[in-house]
């Protein structure tokens, strides 16, 4: 486990103690449910910070343990999706700082996945070509614009993107409009 | 052709595609698009290119996709360890609080007593378990079936999943009035309720009088936000082929709370927003 979160032991006096067994069981279940719904997205997002796969897995693991503490302390349950992305963002940054190495990411490399074997090779190929056209544009975006686009792709609302990246709502809308305008331009060929 | 309103900015169109325009802005845009084919085309290419870019982003990251199952198992083990440790230290702390009573003998006796009392309490808690946590359903959390049976547009799952479903258009004032009259809620301030779709447009629900009901904000547990969670999950399941569209429509129309409980495998809202706020 990574020593990412200083708050790794829980102050029990903060816990609502009438029924700790029931509280931990409920928190357990909620954490696993949220894991099922968001872990894949969070892994992709954390991976975009240039961490190795095993490092990204550790970060996401740490995020869900933080969620467990968060739920046990009965902190706000509003918008847990946004909360998960924010914590992932922060822990990923910390981890990257910790490893102190120049990271290369799939976003920096000029390669793309090979074409899938699929029933309709023609459609597959044109999809592939389209991706080949768009990926360089996405890679060339300033990091913050690219993050906005990634979080949008993960289905986050503008409010959550803004909170995750510490931007204003209007800033997110402008960033996305700018990036998408470029993509449309290139996509048109 | 001359247009009554100026052409919308790129940003407005992107926000419209993402469903991030406020109702008034959306109405103004709809009005403009009705008379401007060029902007209609602009919006279509934004939707298409942005969609392709999303797919590219997700696919590019897939290469790092690891064994989620393995991670889940690891997480479960960690959670179980932590829960057990918490449980132990809670009992220890409780015992210590009692043990501070000065006379050692009393303390020992108290400890014994506590041990059995804790066991009893734990037994009670376990016995009450799920039933105690089942969230009650408030009046108004469900629509009246005779008035709001649910209604759908004729649209296939393939259309819906490709984003060609019915749009969440503004509800016509006449329809709104009719629904409120049905429910005897004409006099209620707007701030007290939301006119909600029973079958969400993402599942093919239409803006028909029979598919709309005034959902009171007063519902604190099974409220509109919890229903939004279900409306996020069901279309995903349908598009993944895990649930049949007709089944999803039927279940959400029959009793959305039961559908929520079924698909989230829970008796109470996963995201207990209700406890936190209503806004």
Image: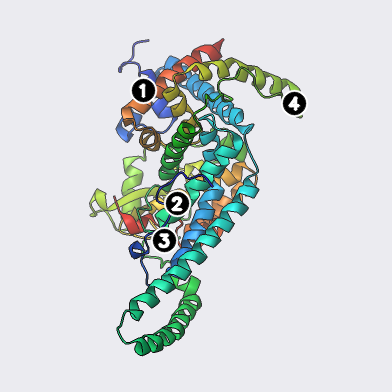
For mark 2, what is the residue?
A67
Residue occupied by mark 3: B144
Asked if the residues shown at circle 1 and circle 4 are in contact, with their CB atoms under 8 angstroms apart, the answer is no
Q: Check chain identity for marks 1 and 4: say if they share one.
A: yes
Where the N terminus of chain B falls, by quadrant? top left
Spatial CA span between label 2 and label 1: 31 Å
Disc 3 is attached to a residue of which chain?
B
Q: Nearer the viewer, mark 4 or mark 3?
A: 4
Task: Label 4, secondary structure: give it.
Answer: loop
In the image, are marks 3 and 1 on the same chain? no
Whether residue A116 sits left or right of residue A135 in the image: it is: right
C-alpha span from label 4 to label 3 = 47 Å
Residue drawn at the location 57% of the way across and 51% of the way down: B248
Q: Chain of mark 1?
A: A
Let me know if residue A156 appears in the view. no
Q: Nearer the viewer, residue B2 or B40?
A: B40
Checking the image for residue A120, the label placed there is 4
Residue at mark 1 to residue at mark 4: CA–CA distance: 37 Å
Asked which quadrant contains residue B98, the reply is: bottom left
Q: Going by the image, does B5 lie left or right of B208?
A: left
Residue that appears at 49% across and 65% down: B85
Between B44 and A189, the residue placed more toward the observer is A189
Q: Are the residues flagged by discs 3 and 1 in contact, CB closer than 8 Å?
A: no
Q: Which residue is mark 1?
A: A174
Foreground mark, 3 or 1? 1
Residue A61, position as x, y percentages in the image: 53, 47
Mark 3 and mark 2 on one chain: no
Residue at point 55%, 38% (across, down): A56
| Disc 2 and disc 1 on one polypeptide chain | yes
Question: Would you identify the image quadrant in which residue B207 lies?
Answer: top left
Q: Residue at x 49, y 80 (%)?
A: B123
**Element at label 1:** helix
């Amino acid at each position: 486990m990574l020593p990412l979160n200083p708050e790794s032991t829980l102050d029990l006096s903060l816990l609502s103690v009438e029924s700790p067994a029931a509280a931990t069981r409920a928190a357990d279940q909620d954490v696993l449910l949220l894991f099922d719904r968001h872990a894949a997205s969070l892994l992709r997002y954390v991976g975009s910070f240039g961490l190795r796969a095993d490092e990204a897995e550790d970060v996401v693991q740490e995020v869900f343990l933080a969620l467990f503490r968060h739920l046990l302390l009965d902190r706000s349950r509003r918008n847990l999706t946004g909360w998960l992305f924010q914590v992932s963002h922060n822990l990923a940054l910390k981890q990257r700082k910790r490893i102190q190495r120049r990271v290369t990411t799939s976003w920096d490399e000029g390669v793309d996945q090979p074409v899938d074997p699929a029933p309709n090779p023609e459609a597959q190929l044109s999809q592939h070509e389209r991706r080949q056209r768009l990926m360089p544009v996405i890679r060339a975006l300033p990091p913050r614009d690219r993050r906005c686009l990634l979080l949008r792709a993960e289905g986050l609302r503008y409010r959550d993107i803004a909170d995750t990246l510490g931007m204003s709502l209007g800033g997110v809308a402008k960033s996305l409009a700018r990036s998408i305008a470029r993509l449309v331009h290139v996509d048109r060929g | 052709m001359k247009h009554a309103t100026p052409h919308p900015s790129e940003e407005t169109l992107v926000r419209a595609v993402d469903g991030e325009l406020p109702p008034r802005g959306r109405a103004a845009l709809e009005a403009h698009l009705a008379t401007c084919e060029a902007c209609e085309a602009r919006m279509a290419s934004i939707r298409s290119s942005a969609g392709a870019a999303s797919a590219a982003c997700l696919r590019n990251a897939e290469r790092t996709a690891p064994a989620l199952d393995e991670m889940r198992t690891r997480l479960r083990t960690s959670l179980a360890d932590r829960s057990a440790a918490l449980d132990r230290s809670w009992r220890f702390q409780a015992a210590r609080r009692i043990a501070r009573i000065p006379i050692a003998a009393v303390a020992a006796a108290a400890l014994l007593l506590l041990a059995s009392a804790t066991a009893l309490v734990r037994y009670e808690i376990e016995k009450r378990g799920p039933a105690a946590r089942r969230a009650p359903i408030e009046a108004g959390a469900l629509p009246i079936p005779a008035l709001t049976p649910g209604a759908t547009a004729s649209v296939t799952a393939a259309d819906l999943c490709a984003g060609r479903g019915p749009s969440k258009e503004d509800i016509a004032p006449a329809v709104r009035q009719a629904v409120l009259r049905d429910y005897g809620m004409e006099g209620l301030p707007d701030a007290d309720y939301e006119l909600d779709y029973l079958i969400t447009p993402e599942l093919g629900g239409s803006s028909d009088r029979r598919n709309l009901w005034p959902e009171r904000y007063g519902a604190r547990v099974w409220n509109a936000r919890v229903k939004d969670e279900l409306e996020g999950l069901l279309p995903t399941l349908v598009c993944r082929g895990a649930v049949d569209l007709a089944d999803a429509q039927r279940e959400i129309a029959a009793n959305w709370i039961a559908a929520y409980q079924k698909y989230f495998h829970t008796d109470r809202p996963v995201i207990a927003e209700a406890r936190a706020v209503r806004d």
